[in-house]
Image (tube, rainbow, N blue to C red):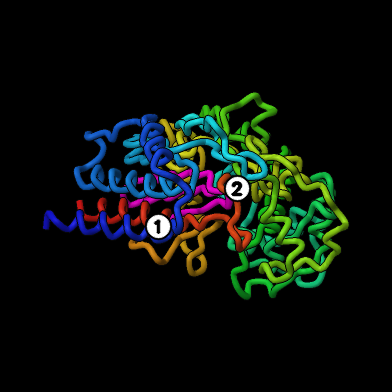
């Protein structure tokens, strides 16, 4: 029995090495990685069992493999148990490459204090939280038609779209469109989305949609009476004393940042290349505002940056692992934190209940993991997991975009790493 964890470690490390593909790092670079891994909170023996501590050590090793291979420049891993941070560690670098894929001579080390562009984690750590608050206050009904709150969202089949449809990605909206080709401000973006026809039948199937969460962001503003960022600061982030969580962090004087992409090469290809998997029927040359620099502290997502001023329901939130752990534990503790109730337990339970295969309200409830967990990913390389049964939280933040796109135009696939870290820790706590 004692030899089994060793086999698991070897199998997972081999998995991540295989997934990482050809290495870019030389031996000297790999040695530097180990030197950068000193920014850590040691695993707390009082809060972590022997099994969990060993699993966390394995997770650290898995992340190190990816960093040493330069599959990702860096990462921060944080694990909580019962409301306590039991492990927090930074790996690698906050930035390895500048625009034009020029490698930095002295790349800055990643630290636990670095802020990350959360990308689609915004959907759950910003917009879904705001919707929860409005539902808890009785200001919003999940099964009400969206046009009750956004009167402009009307038209063929749109009248039957409910708030629940938006939260479960079943409203029939396009998954993505370059809204910034048609809008320069948030009101213009909202008007354009309302004019678009539906792409699918309402409630027919799940089509993961950025546009649906853009609408939810506008809905929060309309019902809550404040812009999304202000509403969240006044009702959640401020009361929780989260000092790094919010939109447009540079304007708030925050730093340092984990760098993301070099402009928007992936998104540009989404518009120009019809074989890339996205449908845009307009003229790709009608707009040419692509950013010619490396992004750091500036949201990667074009629709959030160009069309919504950095504040959108689908993307734009920045935070640190430590702040995210607080928000995650608020959910794990059914709406309460530090003795204060922020959202009623019944609302939390409803949102974290499976409404469609793999889908809660906002959150994903994966079917490939044992037991009941909720999670979400972000395009920039971010990832959150909550395990209510054990009040366990996992935050894994990477800056995968900074190593650039591969020959296929895509960024490194970090899903194998996410699953390996998640499953290693989940298996340990279920063996306790």
Relative height, residue 229 to residue 120 (above, below): above
Per the image, the residue denoted by label 2 is 119
> At x 55% / y 44%, what residue is drawn?
125
Helix, strand or loop at mark 1: helix
For the residues labelled 1 and 2, say whether their Cβ atoms are less than 8 Å apart.
Answer: no
Cα separation, mark 1 vs mark 2, equals 19 Å
How dense is the environment of label 1, judged by Cα within 10 Å: few (below 14), some, or many (20 and up)?
Answer: some
Question: Which of the two labelled residues, at mark 1 and mark 2, occupies the earlier sequence position?
Answer: 2
Q: Is residue 46 left or right of residue 224?
A: left
How dense is the environment of label 2, judged by Cα within 10 Å: few (below 14), some, or many (20 and up)?
Answer: many
Look at the image and tell me whether residue 28 can be seen.
Answer: yes
Quarter of the image for the N terminus: give it: bottom left
299 or 238, which is in the foreground? 299
x, y percentage for residue 176? 70, 61
x, y percentage for residue 391? 34, 46
x, y percentage for residue 118? 57, 44
Q: Is residue 368 left or right of residue 138?
A: left
**Which residues fall within the magenta stretch?**
372-401
The numbered mark at residue 213 is none
375 or 291, which is in the foreground? 291
Q: Is residue 72 left or right of residue 128?
A: left
Q: Is residue 83 left or right of residue 230?
A: left
Q: Is residue 87 magenta?
A: no
The residue positioned farthest toward the front in the image shown: 27
Per the image, the residue denoted by label 1 is 419
> At x 12% / y 54%, what residue is drawn?
2
The residue positioned farthest toward the left in the image shown: 1
């Amino acid at each position: 029995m004692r030899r089994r964890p060793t086999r698991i470690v070897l199998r997972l490390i081999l998995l991540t090495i295989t997934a990482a593909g050809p290495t870019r790092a030389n031996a000297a670079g790999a040695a530097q990685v180990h030197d950068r891994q000193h920014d850590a909170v040691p695993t707390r023996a009082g809060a972590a069992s022997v099994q969990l501590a060993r699993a966390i050590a394995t997770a650290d090793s898995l992340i190190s493999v990816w960093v040493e291979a330069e599959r990702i420049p860096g990462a921060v891993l944080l694990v909580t148990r019962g409301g306590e941070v039991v492990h927090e560690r930074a790996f690698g670098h906050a930035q390895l490459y500048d625009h034009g894929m020029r490698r930095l001579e002295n790349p800055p080390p990643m630290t636990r204090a670095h802020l990350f562009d959360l990308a689609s984690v915004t959907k759950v750590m910003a917009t879904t939280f705001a919707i929860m608050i409005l539902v808890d206050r009785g200001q919003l009904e999940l099964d009400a038609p969206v046009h009750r709150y956004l009167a402009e969202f009307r038209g063929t089949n749109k009248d039957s779209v409910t708030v629940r449809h938006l939260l479960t990605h079943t409203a029939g909206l396009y998954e993505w469109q370059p809204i910034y080709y048609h809008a320069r401000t948030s009101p213009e973006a909202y008007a354009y989305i309302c004019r678009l026809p539906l792409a699918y039948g309402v409630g027919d199937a799940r089509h993961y949609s950025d546009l649906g969460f853009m609408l939810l962001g506008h809905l929060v503003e309309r019902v809550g009476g404040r812009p999304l960022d202000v509403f969240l600061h006044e009702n959640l982030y401020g009361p929780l004393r989260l000092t790094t969580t919010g939109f447009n962090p540079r304007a708030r004087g925050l730093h340092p940042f984990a760098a993301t992409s070099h402009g928007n090469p992936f998104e540009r290809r989404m518009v120009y290349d019809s074989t890339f998997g996205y449908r845009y029927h307009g003229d790709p040359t009608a707009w040419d505002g692509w950013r010619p620099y490396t992004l750091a502290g500036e949201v990667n997502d074009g629709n959030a940056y160009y069309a919504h001023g950095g504040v959108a329901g689908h993307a734009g939130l920045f935070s640190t692992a430590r702040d995210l752990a607080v928000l995650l534990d608020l959910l794990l503790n059914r709406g309460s934190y530090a003795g204060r109730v922020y959202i009623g337990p019944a609302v939390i339970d409803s949102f974290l209940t499976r409404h469609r295969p793999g889908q809660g309200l906002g959150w994903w409830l994966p079917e490939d993991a044992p037991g009941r967990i909720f999670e979400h990913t972000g395009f920039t390389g971010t990832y959150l997991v909550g395990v209510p049964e054990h009040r366990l939280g996992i935050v894994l933040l990477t800056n995968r975009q900074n190593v650039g796109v591969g020959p296929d135009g895509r960024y490194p696939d970090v899903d194998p790493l996410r699953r390996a870290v998640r499953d290693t820790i989940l298996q340990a706590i279920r063996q306790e």
